[in-house]
Amino acid sequence: MPFPSVSRRILVTAALLAAVPAGAQQWLHPDTIARTNQSMFRVLDQWPAPNETRTASGKPGSKYWQQQVDYAIRVAVDTTTHTVTGSERVSYHNNSPDALGYLWFQLDQNIDNPSLSEEMLSGEMLPRTVSPRALEFINARLDTKGYSITRVQLVSKSGQKMDAPYVMQGTQMKVPLTTALPTGGVQAVEIDWSYVMPESFASRNGRGAREKLRDGWEYLAAQWFPRAAVYDDVVGWQNDQFRGQGEFYLNFGNYDVSITVPHNHIVQSTGVLMNPTEVLTATQRQRLVQAMTSEKQVYIITKDEANTPVTRPAGTAPMTWRFKAENVRDFAWASSSGFIWDAAAFRYTPTSKPIEMHSLYPREALGVWDSLSTKAIAQTMRTYGKLAFEYPYPKASNIHGIVGGMEYPMIAFCGARPPANANAAVLKSVGYGLVAVTIHEVGHNWFPMIVASDERKWTWMDEGLNSYLEGMASMEFDTTWPRARLPLIAANIVGYMRNMDQVPLMTESDLIHRGFGPNGYTKPASGLYILREQVLGPQLFDAAFREYSAAWMFKHPQPADFFRSMMQASGDNLNWFWRGWFYSTHANDQAIASVDVQSADSLGMGARGRFYNRVSLENKGGLVMPVVMEFTYTDGSKERMKLPVSIWRNNEKKFEYGRFSQKEVQSVELDPDNALADINTANNKWSKPTAAIP
């Protein structure tokens, strides 16, 4: 564990101090009755025992398994009624060691069904008076219906179809099988469905929605089809209800999707377009070829061409766009007649295959999207590729619309729309927002689209890790990026750390009752940044993070897998950090109780310096953390010391630190950079009394 600022003489002094008998053990969180190990440094007993599926090293075991689910889907959009109508064949591959007597499916659109949605049924009562705008909002929500399921059939190996006696359970659907699906078996299920895509304010989903813009309706389709639930080695069927806050846990598989839209619409989606000669003009195809040889954006549809006949092949009939995607855990798409479209290529090396980068946006987004969106995608590729792994998919698209920020494999929906007639300052601020949300949502391809954690349970495993990487990418995009906008800066989380009503990061997503953003995003991000910058050092942290990321690509890690992997690869026992930052709501409050200065000659050690400084440190918070001290001398010079967290092992409440100095100390300050989320900086500084030291 590197502590580069600790000099050799300090280590010698520490060794001398260690020879002095320590007092009685002092725990921060003592149990006065039980005579048990209560140290913050003790082993975490919440973790499941390692086995052949998940090892003690935090890696997948020799018998790791996960299910595969493939989809063939046909879907059409009626832009008059805004109805999405689809038919799918689901091929469920049972790779588990268990025979399955039924399959569970997620029906996320049912969150908007007043008779089925637990989220709606558990909502609070209406106020006694309702404004006209609120009434419109309430009625719109009550009028939504979720899915209309018109067919569920099991398909035998010979192709025979049999109606399945399915059971609706809120946002879940149970499909019994006629015979149990054995290990290695495949079951095909066909489902027909439809739903009305809501306007954003009418949906509790908050993700897929439609919006009327200057050039017509825009549709952002997300959670739009029945999806098979995950069956894994940890919980069996993960069939928690969808309440809107806890997100998604999904199977990897291959998709073949045909999307039928009005003739004048442009479609972008997960996957690779399979029929460009049918749905794109010769000019657009030529521009796409050009874009894939350029790092700078090339316009496939210019702002002058948007919503004009020149963007479409001849004819008026609806057009079907066909896309295929391999080894993805979800599928989303966008459709509009008013898209402006620019594209460019990204390469990790000059000879590597280009990754397609696409940005599609309406006229309303001009002023920021046309200059920043594709650049932000490229920055995501660079930073995430360096800190986690290189992007393995063939393309990444960013779509502007009513959904403020949401992610799916190879495609992101982002807001950040400039107001009309915005001045330069406003455009700059919106630009920061666009770059941040683009990096964040495109970055979700890494976590959780590829490192596919259970978002329905553990928000921090995708949002927190991704927010950390977002912050790193933002600083690389713009070295003057405002620190107040960075999710990984510890000072930005202090207010939340003071909140007595917070819950631990290790709280299931739907049970985070307050402060969801700080809990799921900024607290884990700032914690990881502290771990990198203040505990392990960038070299060890980055190597450990890359090892975890690579080990769990296209797999399903759990929290203990991450914790174990980071400790194994960094060579550091981090139980104290996980316990404090992730399993508790305790805060860091380090204080200087006193500073005593005496002449080194009085100790008979004048050869080591003129002064011997004793700094009495107190731990008034609930966390143990490293200590950073800055000494300012009477001549104005400064010297910084960094002490490891292990100083608290024998006494978690108090530590007496001693050091020699040639110069006289004027002041001492703890955490001078506000890097450790100290919630009370008023007790962090000591200054020499006015009277001179005798």
Image (tube, helix red, strand yellow):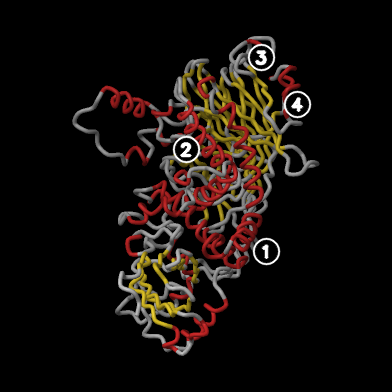
Q: Earlier in the sequence, mark 4 or mark 1?
A: 1
Q: Earlier in the sequence, mark 1 or mark 3?
A: 1
- Which residue is tagged 2? 108
Q: Secondary structure at mark 4?
A: helix
Q: Residue 345, position in %: x, y?
A: 71, 34
Is 477 situated above or below 335? Answer: below
Q: Quadrant of residue 126?
A: top left
* Residue to which mark 1 is pinned: 62
Which structural element holds mark 1? loop
> Horizontal and vertical percent for residue 154?
59, 38
- Residue 290 is tagged as 4
Q: Earlier in the sequence, mark 2 or mark 3?
A: 2
Of residues 496 and 252, the one nearer the viewer is 496
Name the front one of labels 4 and 1. Answer: 4
* Separation (CA) of disc 3 from disc 4: 19 Å
Q: Quadrant of the N terminus?
A: bottom right
Mark 3 or mark 4: name the one nearer the start of the chain. 4
From the top left corner, tell me how far across and down residue 532 is, in percent.
55, 60
Q: Secondary structure at mark 3?
A: loop
Instruction: Identify residue for label 3.
Output: 312
Residue 446, percent across and down? 60, 47
Please indicate, yes or no, whether residue 148 appears anywhere in the rendered image.
Answer: no
Q: Is residue 669 left or right of residue 182?
A: left
Mark-to-mark CA distance, 4 and 2? 39 Å
Three-letter amino acid code of the residue under disc 2: Asp
The CA span between labels 1 and 3 is 52 Å
The crowding category of the residue bearing disc 4, from other C-alpha atoms within 10 Å (few below 14, some 14 to 19, many at least 20), is some
Relative side of 615 to 545, left or right: left
Near mark 2 (Cα within 10 A), the count class, few <14, some 14-19 or many ≥20, is many
CA separation in Å, label 2 and label 1: 34 Å
Q: Which is more foreground, mark 3 or mark 4?
A: 4
